[in-house]
Image (cartoon, rainbow, N blue to C red):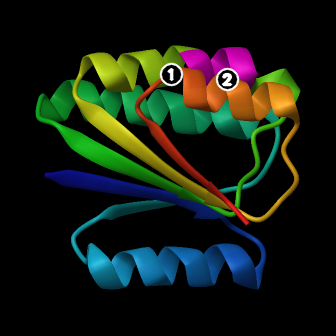
Amino acid sequence: MKTIIISHESDVDGVFSAAIALMRFPQAKTLFTSYGKENFSRISDILYDEIISTQLPGQIIISDLGLNDDMIDLFKDIFNFLKSNLWSIIWVDHHPWSENAIKSAIEEGSVHLVLD
């Protein structure tokens, strides 16, 4: 199973979160990013390309990146694409999320959300 780790690029939380995930999945492709629609769109494009080229089930681990309300539609599209291609999502974060963002992530069914 292919694993892709996505984490925040510019703080210790994100780097350490990615390091912990890499300890469990050492062959994972790792992507670091920051907030903003442009950054999330770039990551989304990379995921589409990766999943199309792989054509196998896999998992995405997202850490230390919150889902803001203005990004929900973008993520709904990628969540649906991942789910239809048998990819699961584990999303671990400590930032506050709105009720709308939590509901949107959980509704997609393929997202295992851990907020602490």
In the rendered structure, are the residues bearing label 2 and label 1 in contact, judged by CB atoms less than 8 Å apart? yes
Q: Residues within 10 Å of mark 1 (few under 14, many from 20)?
A: some
Q: Amino acid at mark 2?
A: Ser
- Observer-nearest residue: 22 or 49? 22
Where does residue 58 sit, x and y in percent of width and height?
22, 43
Residue 104's label in the rendered image is 2
Residue at left 16%, top 37%? Answer: 57
Q: In this rendering, is residue 7 above or below 90?
A: below
Q: CA distance from mark 2 to mark 1?
A: 7 Å
Residue 8's label in the rendered image is none
Q: Residues within 10 Å of mark 2 (few under 14, many from 20)?
A: some
Count numbered badges in the picture. Answer: 2
- Kind of element beneath mark 1: loop
Q: Magenta-highlighted stretch: main secondary structure?
A: helix
Where does residue 31 sit, x and y in percent of width and height?
50, 58
Q: Amino acid at mark 1?
A: Glu
Residue at left 58%, top 18%? Answer: 76
Residue at left 61%, top 25%? Answer: 75
Residue 108's label in the rendered image is 1
Residue at left 58%, top 31%? Answer: 106
Q: Please identify the quarter of the rendering in which residue 50 is found.
A: top left
Where does residue 35 sit, x and y in percent of width and height?
80, 47
Where does residue 64 sit, x and y in percent of width and height?
69, 63
Q: Which residues are magenta?
A: 72-76
- Relative side of 114 to 5, left or right: right
Residue 76 in view (yes/no): yes
Residue 32 in view (yes/no): no
Q: Please identify the quarter of the rendering in which residue 103 is found.
A: top right
54 magenta-colored: no
